[in-house]
Image (cartoon, rainbow, N blue to C red):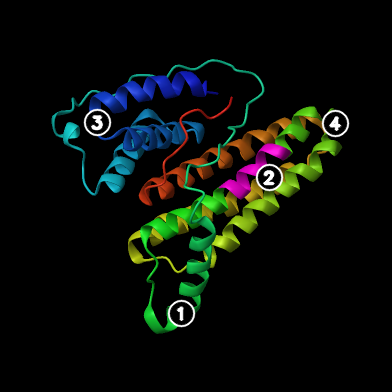
């Protein structure tokens, strides 16, 4: 199993050297690369994912890639970190003023879609997505405090299921939005990632023994990381500032 901290350092250097682009684009590219490794894919798949993510977010291949070397990282540093730790998503940044107004506009625009089409602007979508993301984060972090304090798999069942339920609520909110075509693919990808993560956490909650719990936890974490990448990509697409000091 890869050490995510070491992997991110390794791929951050590679992305900066081989792809370039803005800080946000590089961060998303690194996350895409690490996600491929978490899924058991090789370095070539990780590099391709990083380039594709950067290309999608920039509208083309970043300038630095035109002169990148053809060398590939031979290996990604790996260690045995023991019990896998879950990421702790942090609330996205958005101006407090305007979020409630944005939500109202989304509702009105959704009701009017049959007459006017998708008229929601990027700023409004950004506020709406931030509100939905942060509501999920609140549940996620609260429930993981419970999970971390539990001493049995039975104790962990309820918070795991609540996290799964919060992802379904997240999707309900995303589904209620009329997404313009240029955002639709990333919004759909996030909804699919939310569903996959919810399914994985629901399955994880069925663990009856510590060994079974550990096995299902690994699968749940893979989906957790994939959801994080999809979440970040949509938010970057909408111009939402991502946190730089997520807690460990």
**Mark in front: 4 vs 3:** 3
Look at discs 1 and 2 and give the one toward the viewer. 1
- Is residue 136 inside the magenta stretch? yes
Query: Seen from this angle, which residue lies furthest bottom?
Result: 115
Quadrant location of the C terminus in the rendered image: top right
Please determine whether, in this image, residue 92 is positioned above or below residue 191. above
Q: Quadrant of the N terminus?
A: top right
* Secondary structure at numbered mark 3: loop
Q: Quadrant of residue 79?
A: top right
Q: Nearer the viewer, residue 200 or 88?
A: 88
The residue beneath circle 1 is 112
Question: Which disc number belongs to residue 20?
Answer: 3
Residues in magenta, as a range = 134-142
Residue at far left of view: 67
Q: CA distance from mark 4 to mark 1?
A: 50 Å
Residue under the image location 38 percent in, 80 percent down: 116
SS state under label 2:
helix
| Tag 2 residue | 139
- Give the labeled residue for mark 4: 152
Left or right: residue 60 compared with residue 237? left
Principal secondary structure, stretch drawn in magenta = helix
């Amino acid at each position: 199993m890869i050490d995510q901290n070491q992997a991110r350092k390794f791929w951050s250097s590679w992305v900066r050297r081989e792809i370039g682009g803005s800080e946000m684009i590089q961060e998303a590219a690194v996350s895409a690369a690490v996600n491929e490794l978490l899924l058991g894919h090789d370095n070539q798949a990780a590099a391709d994912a990083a380039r594709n993510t950067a290309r999608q977010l920039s509208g083309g291949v970043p300038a630095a890639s035109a002169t990148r070397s053809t060398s590939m990282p031979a290996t990604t540093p790996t260690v045995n970190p023991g019990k896998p730790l879950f990421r702790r998503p942090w609330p996205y940044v958005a101006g407090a003023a305007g979020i409630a107004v944005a939500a109202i506009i989304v509702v009105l625009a959704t009701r009017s879609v049959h007459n006017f089409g998708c008229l929601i602007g990027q700023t409004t979508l950004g506020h709406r997505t931030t509100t939905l993301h942060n509501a999920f984060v609140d549940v996620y972090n609260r429930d993981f405090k419970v999970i971390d304090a539990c001493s049995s798999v039975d104790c962990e069942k309820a918070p795991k299921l609540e996290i799964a339920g919060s992802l379904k609520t997240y999707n309900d909110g995303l589904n209620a939005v009329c997404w313009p075509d240029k955002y639709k693919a990333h919004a759909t990808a996030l909804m699919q990632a939310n569903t996959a993560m919810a399914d994985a956490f629901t399955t994880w909650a069925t663990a009856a023994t510590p060994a079974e719990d550990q096995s299902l936890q690994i699968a749940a974490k893979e989906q957790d990381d994939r959801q994080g990448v999809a979440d970040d990509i949509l938010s970057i697409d909408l111009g939402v500032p991502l946190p730089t000091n997520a807690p460990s």
